[in-house]
């Protein structure tokens, strides 16, 4: 009875989190219909305006509609973080999967590479890589660079887990049987090993999404993320640096609240998935 | 014990060499390498400019450049910061103590609170007892380090405690799951059935088998804390290494940034190794099992 009640609670929490995530994603995709203003349009007659029917979250110091910027910024963060997570999971699947499959010296080499990557603090690595690239890029290029970097640098942890998963699977009966039929190594890897690692790939993908959202927010707040005028949660958080203004304009906190809500929902979905008894 | 020490030392030296090579390659291939501002002096003739250029000729070969970089590194010379116009060693000597102090507070505070709350949750079997720490950990995990730093700035609390709040949720969640799982293992149930005291069960049968994973958490916490130190030092205007790294990134000062990154990686590795060595000294049997 207790287990059933717990399971019910987990399911309810998961459903609420998924519905909230879907609503936020839908609102960001329908930004053009929900708000008539563009994220870059400046209303010079309403600089720093409080919330009104026209501007639900007021306007910023440049007279831009905060609500429109929040919706478009959500679109950038919510679409590109999963894209970066997909890239890092694919890289991890390729590197970790191959290392586990091939074994021997190659596996030791890859494991050392993973160790090296993991010993570097994530944000330091991002800063170093970001500093190599031009800082005065166009907004669209800056978005691509930021999320490509996140995707390319975030492979190490998933690769380690995928390598371990591959090592566990490599001696499974069905693979031994497949090997005995004489199929090629490539086919064995592609058709038999990778599909059976799918649950690990999915878990790593979903774990990476909130991590990348938070990394983009940190980079944005440091001025190394998405360039203006394109909004993202990170670039919108820069407004909070003027913290004395927050008490007069508490609606400036909307990006933080939305960010916390989305990341918390993603965590609930992930953690409840882990807790559901098989 | 000696074998562990040797293994860790070999690992650190190897990774330092690879990291140094990568760093040197980045600096060598980075834009602006080999450009000397003395060439802009109009009073200099063509021969003088050529002489200045030839000073950098030896550095054009990456292998030669790396050898010189290593030689300098051994002497404690980490190069010159173009943006701050000062030797990197001098800058690090000034700022590193402040960052290390903040990290010590942050890691010890965050790990201490996280572990204490995890222990409380694992030992105290009252329904809902883990609600408050779980909510706090969940909220901290959902906040970027930079926003936590801003919150602390508003509350006029030193930035080092913001590092503790970044470290705390990771330590709490991991150690709670670990301790709860260990408490449910058959050997603990057998010990309880034999009537052993709860303190003895905790230290001898729960903590000891979990020690390798808990020691590994120290290394992860140091890495997390270093990462969090960048936004926290930038937001709270603390003149530490994190702020220096950010300034280097903004000014595209690659020699400075690469040296900081290699140094931070080395320090993280040393922290990991110290945790491993301490564990090997304390419980060699547990360490062997983990290996």
Image: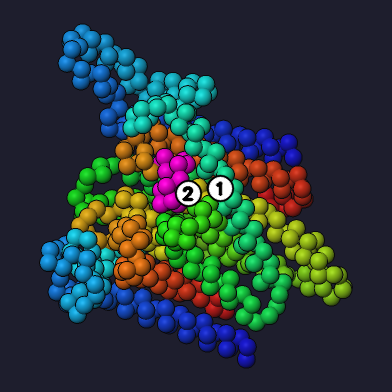
Residue at position x 18%, y 65% in the image: A47
Q: Where residue B37 sits in the image (x, y, percent)?
A: 26, 22
Q: Are marks 1 and 2 in contact (CB under 8 Å)?
A: yes
- Give the residue number, with chain letter if any, for mark 2: B229
Residue A134's image quarter? top left
Say whether residue B220 is visible: no
Task: Indicate how the structure is coloured in the image.
Answer: rainbow
The image quadrant where one finds the N terminus of chain A is bottom right
Relative to A246, is B289 on the left or the right?
right
Report if residue B233 lies within the magenta region: yes
Counting from the top left corner in percent of width and height, residue B168 is at 57, 60
**Magenta segment range?**
B229-245
Marked residue nearer the N-terminal end (1 or 2): 1
Tag 1's secondary structure? helix
Give B78 or A82, whichever is nearer the viewer. Answer: B78
Secondary structure predominantly adopted by residues drawn in magenta:
helix
């Amino acid at each position: 009875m207790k287990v059933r009640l717990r399971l019910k609670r987990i399911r309810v929490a998961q459903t609420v989190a998924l519905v909230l995530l879907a609503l936020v994603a839908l609102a960001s995709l329908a930004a053009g219909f929900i708000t008539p203003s563009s994220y870059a349009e400046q209303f010079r007659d309403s600089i720093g305006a409080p919330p009104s029917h026209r501007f639900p979250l007021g306007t910023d110091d440049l007279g831009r509609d905060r609500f429109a910027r929040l919706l478009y910024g959500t679109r950038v963060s919510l679409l590109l973080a999963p894209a970066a997570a997909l890239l890092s999971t694919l890289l991890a699947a390729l590197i970790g999967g191959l290392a586990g499959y091939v074994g021997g010296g190659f596996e030791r080499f890859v494991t050392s590479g993973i160790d090296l990557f993991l010993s570097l603090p994530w944000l330091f690595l991002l800063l170093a890589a970001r500093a190599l690239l031009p800082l005065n890029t166009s907004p669209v290029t800056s978005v691509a660079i930021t999320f490509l970097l996140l995707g390319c640098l975030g492979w190490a942890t998933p690769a380690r887990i995928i390598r371990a998963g591959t090592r566990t699977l490599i001696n499974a009966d069905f693979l031994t049987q497949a090997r005995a039929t004489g199929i090629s190594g490539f086919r064995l890897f592609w058709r038999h090993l990778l599909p059976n690692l799918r649950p690990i790939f999915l878990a790593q993908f979903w774990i990476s999404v909130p991590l990348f959202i938070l990394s983009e927010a940190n980079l944005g707040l440091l001025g190394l993320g998405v360039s203006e005028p394109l909004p993202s949660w990170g670039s919108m958080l820069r407004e909070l640096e003027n913290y004395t203004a927050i008490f007069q304009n508490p609606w400036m906190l909307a990006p933080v609240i939305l960010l916390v809500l989305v990341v918390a929902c993603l965590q609930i979905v992930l953690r409840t998935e882990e807790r559901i008894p098989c | 014990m000696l074998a562990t020490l040797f293994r860790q030392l070999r690992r650190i030296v190897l990774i330092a060499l690879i990291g140094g090579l990568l760093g040197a390659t980045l600096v060598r291939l980075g834009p602006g390498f080999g450009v000397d501002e003395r060439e802009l002096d109009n009073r200099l003739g063509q021969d003088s400019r050529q002489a200045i250029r030839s000073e950098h000729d030896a550095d054009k070969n990456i292998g030669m450049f790396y050898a010189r970089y290593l030689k300098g590194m051994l002497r404690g010379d980490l190069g010159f910061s173009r943006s701050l116009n000062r030797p990197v060693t001098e800058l690090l000597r000034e700022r590193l103590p402040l960052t290390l102090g903040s990290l010590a507070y942050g890691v010890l505070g965050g790990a201490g609170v996280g572990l204490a709350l995890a222990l409380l949750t694992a030992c105290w079997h009252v329904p809902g007892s883990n609600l408050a720490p779980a909510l706090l950990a969940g909220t901290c995990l959902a906040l970027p380090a930079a926003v936590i730093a801003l919150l602390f700035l508003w509350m006029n609390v030193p930035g080092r405690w913001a590092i503790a709040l970044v470290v705390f949720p990771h330590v709490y969640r991991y150690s709670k799951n670990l301790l709860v799982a260990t408490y449910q293992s058959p050997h603990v149930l057998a010990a309880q059935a034999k009537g052993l005291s709860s303190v003895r069960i905790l230290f001898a049968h729960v903590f000891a088998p979990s020690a390798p994973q808990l020691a590994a958490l120290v290394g992860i916490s140091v890495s997390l804390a270093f990462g969090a130190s960048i936004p926290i030092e930038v937001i709270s205007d603390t003149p530490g290494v994190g702020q220096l790294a950010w300034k280097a990134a903004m000014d595209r000062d690659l020699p400075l940034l690469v040296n900081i990154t290699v140094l931070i990686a080395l320090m993280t590795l040393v922290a990991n190794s110290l945790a491993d060595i301490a564990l090997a000294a304390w419980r060699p049997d547990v360490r062997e099992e983990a290996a």
